[in-house]
Image (spheres, helix red, strand yellow):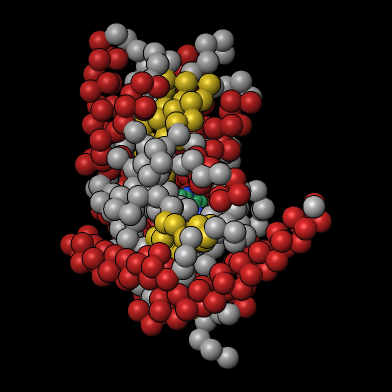
Amino acid sequence: MPKKIYLDYAATTPVAKEVLNEMLPFFSEEYGNAMSVHSFGLTALQAIDNAREQTARFFGASPSEIIFTSGATESNNLAIKGVLKSYYSKTGNKNKRPHIITTAFEHHCVLNACETVEEEGLAEVTFIKPKKDGVVNMQDIQKAIKDNTILISVMYVNNEIGTVQPIKKIGALLKKENKMRAEKSLWPIIFHTDATQAVNYFDCDVNKLGVDLLSMSAHKIYGPKGIGSLYIRKGTAIKHIQDGGDQEYKMRAGTHNVPGIVGLGKAVSMIKTERIQQKNAELIELRNHLIGRILKEIPKSRLNGSAIKRSPNNANFSFKDVEGEGLLLSLDMEGVACSTGSACSSGALSPSHVLLSIGLRPEDAHGSLRITLGKHTTKKDIDSAVEKIKTVVERLRKISGKVLEEFYNNKK
Ligand code: PMP
């Protein structure tokens, strides 16, 4: 059996050994509930405090601004619905609907949360389309701002095509905008970013970015699944959306996932900001080798999204006349694991909303392949994967060519 090649690091990453080792005692030795007053509880609480400090340090925040959640899905839901809840509890006004701005190519947890609050009549939402290169236009955001805008949510790195959004610039724009709004006694605009795919590769200092809320998930950074965090800038108007206990400064009820939290803290602390540039450069070289070979050696292939403004680990291709799901399954049989679009939607056969948003035709948006690299990816893996992709694409094109030929023959 040949070695399997994992090229789906944007879907999830393996837990680092160092992370696992930190977590292990908290399953069956130090198993206290962090809310208990006895020594078992205290040990768990101290471990959580330590993880909160590690997380806060990474984001340039203070520990009381970090809330642990079950992952980015929950963080994003809390950010959007919690801000709305606070708005209504403060204004008590159900008649004047507030306005939210987001993008058309957010992860489904943001898109669907926005659609839900819109359907429930709680907010009007503007979904900004990115440009063809997969980057949102600052002017489009600026133009969309209205007097009743209370929240802007823009992802840092797109999970399908890896394109990087101008978060710092939007943050700076909103700083100015909010000064003017204060003079006009308008509600300040809260800025949220889903940084889930950015944490490993880009500066996530919340003050440099100028964000008020930032979501992430540990399993994208060699931490465990089912744990994430939401940074909440001190003073941000947001309310809890889940009722229960007083955990997490009353922002997120439910018994703490102590091993998960410990794992998240360790995973975040292992990203050495001073080494990010070097690591990115290594990954970019590998990723560009992949892109170069695919585009050169496979006819009628294209790279989706900007070649430059993209995450070091992401390559997303479309192959004309090749159906994405077929490609994925055939590659899996060859031992290569990658994805079409996001893992969460790759079970569905609808064309990728991300690719549609950057102007691909539905038939082209069906045939995409997302390849995401990680710290265990080697040049040998890439070269071996390219050979397999070449063979599979050729095979599938022959089949689809025959099917099309038969289709047209039957029509004659
Ligand atoms: N946002 C982005 C950008 C993601 O890539 C993901 C995971 N695919 C999520 C949110 C959701 O993360 P989780 O499933 O860990 O809640």
The residue lying at 51 percent from left, 25 percent from top is: 125
The residue closer to the viewer here, 56 or 45, is 56
Task: State the image quarter where residue 264 is shown.
Answer: bottom left
Question: Is 41 above or below relative to 309?
Answer: below
The residue closer to the viewer here, 331 or 184, is 331
Residue 89, how many percent across, how many down? 50, 20
Query: Count the marks: how many?
Result: 0
Residue 196 shows up from this direction: no
Question: Is 315 above or below relative to 255?
Answer: below
Residue 361 shows up from this direction: yes
Left or right of 116 on screen, residue 409: right
What is the quadrant of the N terminus in the image?
bottom right
Left or right of 43 on screen, residue 205: left
Residue 408, how many percent across, how many down? 74, 55
Which residue is farthest front?
A: 412
The residue lying at 81 percent from left, 56 percent from top is: 410
Residue 68, how many percent across, how many down? 44, 50
The residue lying at 63 percent from left, 26 percent from top is: 119
Residue 64, how many percent across, how many down? 33, 43
The residue lying at 30 percent from left, 40 percent from top is: 166
Which residue is farthest left?
A: 274
